[in-house]
Image: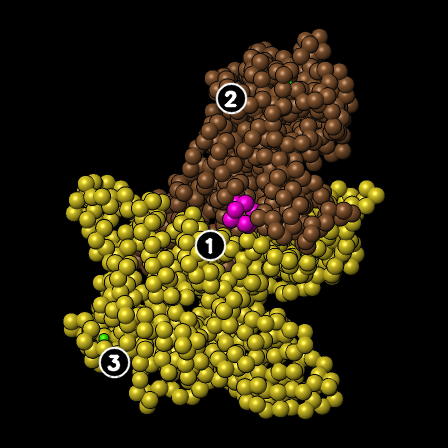
Chain colours: A yellow, B brown
Amino acid sequence: MLKEAIYHRPKDNYAYACTNEELHIRIRTKKDDIMEVSLLNGDPYDWCDGKWNFNTVSMIKSGSDQLFDYWFVSIKPPYRRMRYGFVLNDGTETVYLTEKGFYSEPPEDTGFYYAFPYLNNIDVFRAPSWVKDTVWYQIFPERFGNGDPSNDPEGALPWGSAAPERDNFFGGDLEGVIQNIDYLADLGISGIYFTPIFKAYSNHKYDTIDYMELDPQFGDKDTLKRLIQVCHEKGIKVMLDAVFNHSGFYFPQFQDVLEKGQDSPYKDWFHIWEFPVVTEPKPQYDTFAFEKAMPKLNTENPEVIEYLLEVGRYWVREFDIDGWRLDVANEVDHSFWRKFRSEVKAIKPELYILGEIWHDSMPWLRGDQFDAVMNYPFTTNILNLFARNSITVKEFIENMTTVNHMYPKNVNEVAFNLIGSHDTPRILTECGGDEDKVKQIFTVLLSYIGTPCIYYGDEIGMSGAQDPGCRECMKWNEEDQNKDMFGHVQRMIRLRRDYPLLANEGELHFIPSDYHNSCFAYTKSNGESTILVVVNMSDEETNYHLPFNLSGKKITNIYTGEEYAAESDDLSAAIAANGFALFQF
Amino acid sequence: MLKEAIYHRPKDNYAYACTNEELHIRIRTKKDDIMEVSLLNGDPYDWCDGKWNFNTVSMIKSGSDQLFDYWFVSIKPPYRRMRYGFVLNDGTETVYLTEKGFYSEPPEDTGFYYAFPYLNNIDVFRAPSWVKDTVWYQIFPERFGNGDPSNDPEGALPWGSAAPERDNFFGGDLEGVIQNIDYLADLGISGIYFTPIFKAYSNHKYDTIDYMELDPQFGDKDTLKRLIQVCHEKGIKVMLDAVFNHSGFYFPQFQDVLEKGQDSPYKDWFHIWEFPVVTEPKPQYDTFAFEKAMPKLNTENPEVIEYLLEVGRYWVREFDIDGWRLDVANEVDHSFWRKFRSEVKAIKPELYILGEIWHDSMPWLRGDQFDAVMNYPFTTNILNLFARNSITVKEFIENMTTVNHMYPKNVNEVAFNLIGSHDTPRILTECGGDEDKVKQIFTVLLSYIGTPCIYYGDEIGMSGAQDPGCRECMKWNEEDQNKDMFGHVQRMIRLRRDYPLLANEGELHFIPSDYHNSCFAYTKSNGESTILVVVNMSDEETNYHLPFNLSGKKITNIYTGEEYAAESDDLSAAIAANGFALFQF
Ligand SMILES: [Ca+2]
Ligand SMILES: [Ca+2]
């Protein structure tokens, strides 16, 4: 037994309260080293005749990545507290793992065991219940629809008349979203994530000038209220983007510091290294990256804290928004985010808080800060497998398994899964124009754990390179839209709604990569019903034999509606070249 | 290279801000597997000609336990943010570890690397600066000194006239501490930890009746104010004990619920399973353990939160106490403790918050909840080595190394190290009456990382079995006091004060256990000066050869004052049977 490979530490992704009654326990062991793992557990205070009363319960292998196997069990401690250890068997020896190390017999002293001291309700990680069933749609407001030419910025170009540039404008606005709400409802999405709409200088609006005002090119506050009302009537949630790490260069408070230096009442709103403020050749103040136009806000200054908290509260309180997406979230202090969560959830407990973090995000996902982060590892792995062919199916499965086990299950359910955004080439471009690949990607995106997000226009087959290329005006002429792609995305969204297994009900298991020479496959299952997603990575049609005992089962391809009669309890089905299938049984 | 053994995850004990400018990075590898580890690091946004600018810096091996080596480096990222990876060499291959896994070449994409996104000042773990130099003294107030017979409880026995029982009283009080303050000052301690002094039923007072009142048997509030003033004049801090997990049975709010059931305004102050409230045979409400007399408080109820927060604030605000020790701290929710910290530190930023947690405590020591926990692993290992002979020196070193690497260094500095308390047999009793062993233990306690605590009376050689035996009245007759032991403890306290190396300046390194057949030894060093603590575990005098190049060094045994002349650059010194020495050079 390779003891050095075995890892467990209470809390975070290894031992966490899933509800206020249910604990999830995981342990990591070397790949293919251990045959059986059980959880030895009991109430810490439950003694009888001087001996601790404990039970053992089997753990299941929940996944394997390149180096490790992961084991899982869900358990309900009757008094909401638990001491526990692990019983590991590799076929030749049985070993007991406790907080104090490895033993050949279970230690009698409960002090040796791991502790989950108490399942306090308030500490349970709980994202808003609506999130896990949501399909997001990301809108870059300047480019989705121009519903009101009267608010177009000076020099705005006719819709779609030119390629998107860093500094051109086309007049997109909130009215344009209202006017196209039926399109979105028809597509079936249930949440819109808007990149920033507050007053700013650029066309992307990440350089905020006034956090309390809408950019006039997008409309006025009444329009936003109307938009949110219309969305809510259609069952669509609305999430806004908050850039709290740094302000824009033309944020008046920063301009005041530039002008007045140490005499500015806002001099402590930023991290200025010396006065008077130097911007060239290198900014002499903290910035995002080394960008002089993005001065980092001092989120430890009580005035800044109160200003930003009021921003957070204001748009929830007055406009009933449903979510905040937080830009560059990991560079802002944890302390601020805890206050932020507390303040905005006090107004609307079901508000969703989504952080932009590209790295391991566990420290922000403990229930006291964010509900989710942008799932960039998902993006990277999808692109590497389907678009770039830079990883094998085996590697894809291993990488995805690693990510799944980095976080609690209830965190994974609300991860914000994206395949592109205003910051990346469009998915069709990533795939070299291969529509079949894009369809496969949408199939996976919309049948995977987490909450999928569609970048505006990807569903009609728009293409575009790295920004600004990916920020083209939405194509509203039907002849410019890829109807086939739209139909695919629409169908997958409906299937996800009709079959909760495709969303976040049940467990995901990958079919081992060596099972088939060209098909990548996984199941979503709740024990009663299973959906098998099969994706044929090859340019040739192939036959896929379903690796299940299908005796007495009715098998349906829920995408095509085709029904299969299982012969001698099993089934083989043709999967089209670069195609996919969703078998339900 | 055993990749499966290698562990790193940002934040917590593996990557943490030590100050707002300095990061500590650690990595764990299989014991004796890796020869060299370096940290590859750079600013995430520092690019030149499309290539990331990074440096590499060597890591040092900071310790080894049973299975692993630990590596450490301290680094100051110029812009307070860092991307990093590890370069591992085992003599045959060089491997690069990033967040995305192992590579044979350093990945070009900075997205692959680990991130420490920003060293935000407010997120830095910072215990009050005075704590790491404090020597604590634990007082069980009923048994330390009876300074005012007029407040003795009915039936109180003459001081020391009987063995301590679960329910007898001897009249100890706060005035008794005031009257003996010179004794404590002479001993040299710099902080008193009082077990509970609030109104309660028992002699231990852990069954609180009124958190806002002193128990009248201990004196009135003026006496407490005078006591704290006297302590502060002597440079002694005062820490009180708060039992917030549960109230006592006679807490009026609980009595009201017992009496009025659902009609009680306090019915939601607890976790009652059914009304009317059932206490027998098993309590039908949440309790500490299964103790009906200790109903768990509902610390998610806003009224209870405000009540307990006001308790926390009141004794700080009105009495200027210096610390709160929190009983059963890990069964109360994290959310409450975050509020508690914020509220009490707002009144007194230099207040110390100490949690009673017996297990791995990282989730409470991230800077947002506690400053320290009771270091029971220290207790257990000291007892197992010195008193119970149940572990070898090798195991002791391994276990202590494990614990040291479970937490950040700045957390270890303020760990509350104890060798016994009102809940355990006294140290002399644990050692079977062997005073030499006790002296050795005090030598280690007072020269180790962390903040040591002396349980009242241990310094004069009092004995006593498991409680109530360990709660005997303090012996004030000089002929009953072990003056030799007192002198030893006093001297070690003074040495710790005079030689900051003995406290928390510099680094601790264990001398490998196989270096000497009977001596256990470690150094405390700051690079310029070193103190070597040698403890002879055998019943025979032994010669200890100092494993250092002592060329040109003046060597002093700072305990005896003896000076040594190093011969041919080295030194061997006699260590008495069951003795010890502290060499400084
Ligand atoms: Ca417009
Ligand atoms: Ca008295």
Question: From the image, which quarter does the N terminus of chain A lie in?
Answer: bottom right
Disc 1: host chain: A
Which residue position is annotated with label 1?
A369
**Residue type, numbered disc 1:** Gln
Mark 3, ligand 1, within 8 Å: the answer is no
Region of the chain picked out in magenta, as a range: B298-305
Q: Ligand 2 sits in which quadrant?
A: top right
* Label annotation for residue A160: 3
Which residue position is annotated with label 2?
B222
Q: Is residue B570 above or below residue A14?
A: above
> Secondary structure under badge 1?
loop
Name the residue: 68% across, 28% down.
B203
In percent of width and height, residue B134 lies at: 53, 25
Disc 2: host chain: B
In percent of width and height, residue B218 lies at: 61, 23
> Secondary structure under badge 3?
loop
Question: From the image, which quarter does the C terminus of chain A lie in?
Answer: bottom right
Can residue A46 be seen in this snapshot? no
Disc 3: host chain: A
Crowding around mark 2 (Cα neighbors within 10 Å: few <14, some 14 to 19, many 20+) is few
**Residue B302 belongs to the span the image colors magenta:** yes
In percent of width and height, residue B200 lies at: 64, 32
- Distance of label 2 from label 3 (alpha carbons): 80 Å
Side of B80 where A109 appears, left or right: right
Mark 1, ligand 1, within 8 Å: the answer is no
Name the residue: 22% across, 63% down.
A201
